[in-house]
Image (spheres, grey):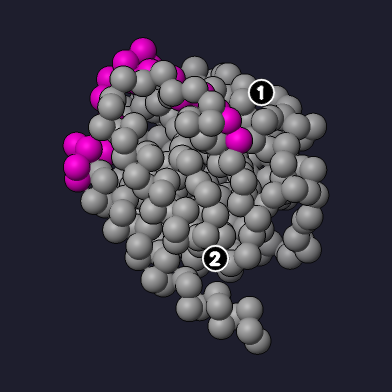
Amino acid sequence: MMSAVAQPFVAEVELARLHPEEQSAAAAFLAAYPPGAGSPLAVVIAAFNEEPTVAEVVAEVPKEAAGLASEVIVVVDGARDATATQALSAGALVCDVPVNRGQGAALRLGYWLARARGAEVIATLDADGQYEPLELGRVIEPIVSGRADFVTGSRRLGAELTTDAIRHAGVILFGALISVLIRQRITDPACGVRAMRADLTAAVTLEQPQYQASELMISAALAGFRVAEVPTTMRDRGAHATKTKKGGNFGYGLRFARAAITTWNRDRTRFRRRSQT
């Protein structure tokens, strides 16, 4: 597996680069869980008001995946319930941010915390229990074996146990859109289970506060990182969560498309110029 050259982590310097609303929570996290002392695999979960499901998700994460020992980092994104307490009780390392800023912002902070802990590979899961934690090994393996830098799960290649026909059609539509943008076939651009080399998360630009899945994939592909998909399972939301927090399908689709196209416009020229120098 390709790995980045480790750079000294100076907490005061690095914390100053975070968003002001994240700094105190990140400092408390590093005081509880020291930099450089983490597992090679960090599973990052962003959680907003997920008290009913987050503990079960954390508990289901395997202690080892694809030969890498794991730890779970839960970034609580301004929750107003007992999400933080439940995640902590299940064994997660918890960063409790007092302000709700969106899943994209919470994941971005989680990547930073994972790198600070010394992770080599970072994976993500949603906190609502829709994805199978035991499938993490399948997602991580192409990175460990050196065949990919960024791997996303695909419910279309695997199994989709949901009943939302409109959301299913949206996955097909946006998969086609991103396939055109990055010139590589993508079947599922919004899967919540994915994995990547830790240094990739520092090399790409992540700005989206909410719809980061498309931003991360497009930016990684345009930067020259190898992107792959593997089959995964998406469970029926009804058995694991009360309702989606992403709003109606139409509004969600518009915002997802805007994030994808904005990222492509932002990165296509920048990375092309970099490759020519």
Task: Name the image quarter holding the C terminus.
Answer: bottom right
Helix, strand or loop at mark 1: loop
- Judging by the rendered image, the residue that carries numbered circle 2 is 222
Give the mark nearer the N terminus: 2 vs 1.
1
Left or right, 240 with respect to 17, comes to: left
Look at discs 2 and 1 and give the one toward the viewer. 2
When asked about the image quadrant of residue 163, the answer is top left
Image coords of residue 254 (percent x, y)? 24, 51
Cα–Cα span, label 2 and label 1: 32 Å
When asked about the image quadrant of residue 226, the answer is bottom right
Judge whether residue 165 is colored magenta.
Answer: no
Helix, strand or loop at mark 2: helix
Foreground of the two, 266 or 186: 186
Outermost residue toward the bottom in this view: 277
Image coords of residue 99 (percent x, y)? 31, 47
- Judging by the rendered image, the residue that carries numbered circle 1 is 62
Highlighted range, magenta: 230-251
Image coords of residue 246 (percent x, y)? 27, 38
